[in-house]
Image: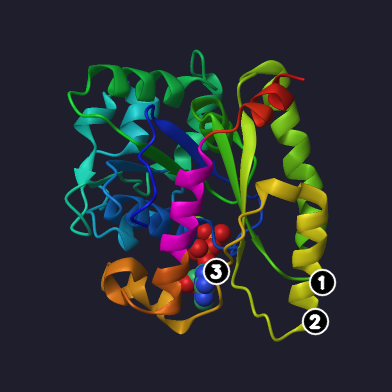
Amino acid sequence: TMDAPLPNHTRVFTVSNQKGGVGKTTTTVNMAAAFAKAGARVLVIDLDPQGNASTALGVEHTADIPSVYDVLIDDFPLADVVQSSPESESLFCAPSTIHLAGAEIELVSQVAREHRLRTALDEFLASSEETWHYVLIDCPPSLGLLTINAFVAAREVFIPIQCEYYALEGLSQLLGSIELIQKHLNPTLSLTTILLTMFDGRTNLANQVADDVRTHFTDRVLTTVIPRSVRVSEAPSFGQTVISYDPTGVGAISYLEAAAEIARRGFSSEHDKEARG
Ligand code: ADP
Ligand code: MG
C-alpha cells in the first residue's frame, strides 16, 4: 500500500446492494480500516439499523447513544454523533442505533427527506478542521429512504458482489435505482467500484460469475478479489476488523490491496461523463 496516494478531495462511497448477506458491512469496515492503515482519515456512516458496522468498528451504539438517527430526524450535526474507532487513530464512525429502524417511516413526512444525510455530511466536511479522505456509507439491504439518502450523499457507488448463481439477477434492480437517482436526485452519482467478495476460486460457478461480472462491468471491477476466509467472519465478534484481528492473513491482505487499487485508480472522469449521460 506504500504506493497508494491519498485523494486530494473527499471521496464519498455508498456501499450498496439490495441483497442481504453479500458482504456490504464486512467490505465497508475492512475497506475503511485498510484506507486508515494506509494513512487516510476515514469516516464510516452506519445507515443499517442492525448496527453491524458500528459493532465491527468497536463503537458504542446502544439505544441511548446519539446516532445517525438523530442526524436524520432531529437535525443533530454529524460531528455530535461521530465517535473514534479503537481500530485506528484516523478511523471514525457515525453509529446506527435501533432507533434507525423507525427512521425509514419517520423520514416519509420530513422536509427534503432524500437530502438529509447529504446536507449533514456537506456541513460536517465544510466545518471540520481535518481533511477527510474517505467516507463510506454502509447501507441496509433495501432500496428505501435510508439507502436513497446514501445515494444522494455519495459521489461513488461501491457494489460488493458475492459470486453465486443469482448475483447478476439482483443487480438490474439496483442499477435501475441508481439511474433513477442520477436522473432525479443526484446527477453526479457514479458507479465506480465493484468488488467480488467471499470468492472461492476452486468452484467453476464462482469463476463463471466472476467472468460474467468482468465482461459486463469491465474496468469498474477491482482486480483484487476477497476470498472466503473464516478470519474475516470471526473478526466482528471481537469488535475488530480483519485488518487488526489477523493483519497478515489473506483477508486483511486482500482488503489492503483493494484499498490500494482504489487509491491508485482515483476517480475516473470517464465514469463521471457516463453518470451525467
Ligand atoms: P451484508 O452487510 O451485505 O448483509 P455482511 O458483510 O454482514 O453482509 O456479510 C454476511 C456474512 O458473510 C457475515 O456473516 C460475514 O461475516 C460473512 N462474510 C463476509 N465476507 C466474508 C469473507 N470474505 N469470508 C467469510 N465470510 C464472510
Ligand atoms: Mg450489513
Q: Amino acid at mark 2?
A: Asn
Disc sitting over residue 226 in the figure: 3
Q: Is residue 99 magenta?
A: no
Direction from residue 164 to residue 103 in the image, left or right: left
Q: CA distance from mark 1 to mark 3?
A: 16 Å
Q: Which residues are magenta?
A: 255-266
Residue 98 place in picture, x, y as percent = 37, 49
Coordinates of residue 11 in the picture (x, y in percent): 44, 33
Q: Is residue 265 magenta?
A: yes
Kindly indicate the quadrant of the structure image that contains residue 199: bottom right
Which residue has dot 1 on it? 208
Residue on which the image places disc 2: 204
Q: Residues within 10 Å of mark 3 (few under 14, many from 20)?
A: many
Q: Identify which residue is drawn at 20% across, 55% down.
A: 88
Label 2 – label 1 distance at C-alpha: 6 Å
Q: Is mark 3 within 8 Å of ligand 1?
A: yes
